[in-house]
Image (cartoon, rainbow, N blue to C red):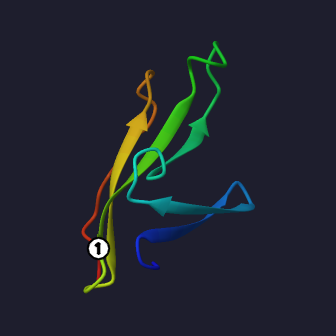
Amino acid sequence: MVKDRVTLLLNYKGHPYQYVLYKKRSLDTIRVELLNDGQNKLKDKTFLILVLDKIDKKEGEVSFNLFIKDKNSRILVDFKKADK
């Protein structure tokens, strides 16, 4: 976290990715394809959408909104309380 931006490092399918997110529209979102094994390769894709919500510079914490686009309901999400 530096000033008004957050750097997110992601290891996805064995490849490293780096995203720099800002609190500005269209620069605050990443979209990652999770599944693509349906009949229609365009419509049956499942995505994780991560949106930067809040940067708390005093606490050194960042909040995200998490969305999953899954028309075929193949993903089950279970949230657990974070350990600090």
**Residue nearest the viewer, comparing 24 with 82:** 24
Q: 65 above or below 83?
A: above
Q: Position of residue 29 (x, y in %)?
A: 46, 49
Q: Is residue 38 visible?
A: yes
| Residue labelled with disc 1 | 82
Q: Residue at x 41, y 27 (%)?
A: 73
Residue lying furthest right: 15
Question: Please, what secondary structure does the residue beneath circle 1 have?
Answer: loop
Q: 24 above or below 72?
A: below
Q: Position of residue 76 (x, y in %)?
A: 38, 41
Question: Picture quarter containing residue 75?
Answer: top left
Q: Position of residue 26 (x, y in %)?
A: 46, 44
Q: 2 above or below 5?
A: below
Q: Residues within 10 Å of mark 1 (few under 14, many from 20)?
A: few
Question: Picture quarter containing residue 8?
Answer: bottom right
Q: Residue at x 26, y 85 (%)?
A: 59
Q: Residue at x 59, y 35 (%)?
A: 35
Total labels: the figure holds: 1
Question: Picture quarter containing residue 72?
Answer: top left
Inspect the image, locate mark 1, and give the three-letter code of the amino acid beneath it: Ala
Picture quarter with the C terminus: bottom left
Q: Position of residue 20 (x, y in %)?
A: 55, 63
